[in-house]
Image (cartoon, grey):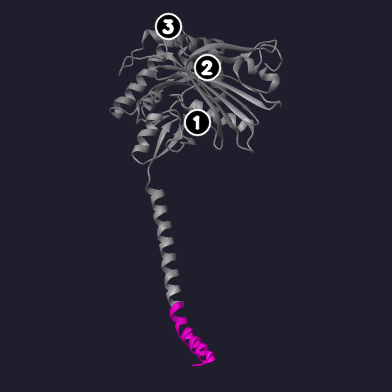
Amino acid sequence: MSLSHRLSCLAVLLALAAPAAAQDIGRSLKRTAERAVQSEVERAVDREVRRATRCALGDDRCAAEARRRGEDVEYVDSRGRVVQSAPAAGGQAASGPAFRVLPYAGSSQREEKVLAFDGYAFVVGRESNGDLRSRQVEGRVTKTIYDNPSGRSTLEILRNYEQALRGQGLRVVHQCAGRGECGGTGTRESNWYRVADMNIGVGGDFRYLAAEGRVGASAVSVAVMVNKQRSWVYVVEGEAMQTGQAGVSADELAAELAAAGVVRLDGIYFDTGKATLKPESADALAQVAELLRRDPSLRLEIVGHTDSVGNAAANQRLSEERALAVRSALVIEHRVPDRRLRSRGAGASEPVAPNTSEAGRALNRRVELVKQ
């Protein structure tokens, strides 16, 4: 058979086979498309049915338990709003602080240093001559430096840290922006680098925030400095706080009420399951009385809150009785006119954190002052 004849036969065979091959390819493509659609549907269903547990920022136990159950974790602020997503499992260094401050979204960690016990100059204001005013706090000190994501203002980054810290029950004791307002920008000994180990940067666009409070039985102080390039976060976890400490001052209460209209009243203690005020509450009550004395036009609503443990009706009644106990103490012991005060109980209906862990329940058991 000649070469040309053999080529002609091959051409005929290929032509006859082409429709069948095309059909096979078509069927294969159809099966591939169907599998892709099915996979996408399954992923969408998985996203819908996967549970997400909400944890107070810093509540590592809540997050760890949720991940162990295969659930997603969302961190929430004091109003129950999601403020930051939890990092992936294993993303937190074991040597980090027990009180965790998550970085602003998109930040990358540049450095972290943990000292089991040390002192730190906690900047809480500015002197009239421009020097920094600080006080020494002691305990476990964690210093973390982050590179900021591009395209974000120092105001936006600091506001996110502020929201997160408030959501964990801390109160802001000082914040400032720029050289004139913050001070400590000269070459004297009292500058940001020498005092607080923070770099304000070459420009004037920097912001600082100091917050503190009680988390469980520990005193926690957090200092945050944000410039255009980086953020410094210092966490100092002190030893168990002494009982009988107010934890607040009239100045701090006034500032928080002016900024947010509501403030958590730390330093109020009750007998377990009762509305009986403990003697250690005296200092905090005195600060509230001082706040009202300074501003004769101020009227306050005192709101009691509980966790969700136990009977809902009993929790509601307990929250009402505790709020009334605070109101009565202010009226009887501090001569505050009763017309300037209201009280109500919210029970467990207004949580600021999940009730799935002791840390979350501790945040929910609280007394708040609401500006009227």
The answer, for residue 41, to whether it is visible in the render is: yes
The quadrant holding residue 179 is: top right
Residue 197 appears at what percent x and percent y? 60, 19
Confirm or deny contact between disc 2 and disc 1 (CB under 8 A): no
Residues in magenta, as a range: 1-21
Q: Give whichever of discs 2 and 3 has the lower sequence position.
A: 2
Q: Which residue is mark 2?
A: 253
| Front tag of 2 and 1 | 1
Query: Going from the N terminus, do you reach mark 2 or mark 1 first?
Result: 1
The answer to whether residue 350 shows anywhere in this view is no
**Which of the two discs, 3 and 1, sits closer to the camera?**
1
Q: Nearer the viewer, residue 91 or 318?
A: 91
The answer to the question of whether label 3 and label 1 lie on touching residues, with beta carbons closer than 8 A, is no
Which numbered marker is on residue 102? 1
* x 37%, y 29%: residue: 61
* Residue 161: percent from left, percent from top: 54, 29
Amino acid type for the residue under numbered disc 2: Leu
Helix, strand, or loop for circle 2? Answer: helix
x and y percent of residue 90 in the render?
43, 35
Q: CA distance from mark 3 to mark 1?
A: 42 Å
Residue for point 43% across, 61% down: 37
Q: Quadrant of residue 116?
A: top left
143 relative to 248, above or below = below
- 19 lies left or right of 318: right
Task: Give the residue type that dot 3 points to.
Answer: Glu
Q: Which mark is residue 333?
A: 3
* Residue 24 inside the magenta-drawn segment: no
Majority secondary structure of the magenta segment?
Answer: helix
For residue 359, side relative to residue 115 (left or right)? left
Q: Is residue 238 above or below residue 87?
A: above
Q: Amino acid at mark 1?
A: Leu
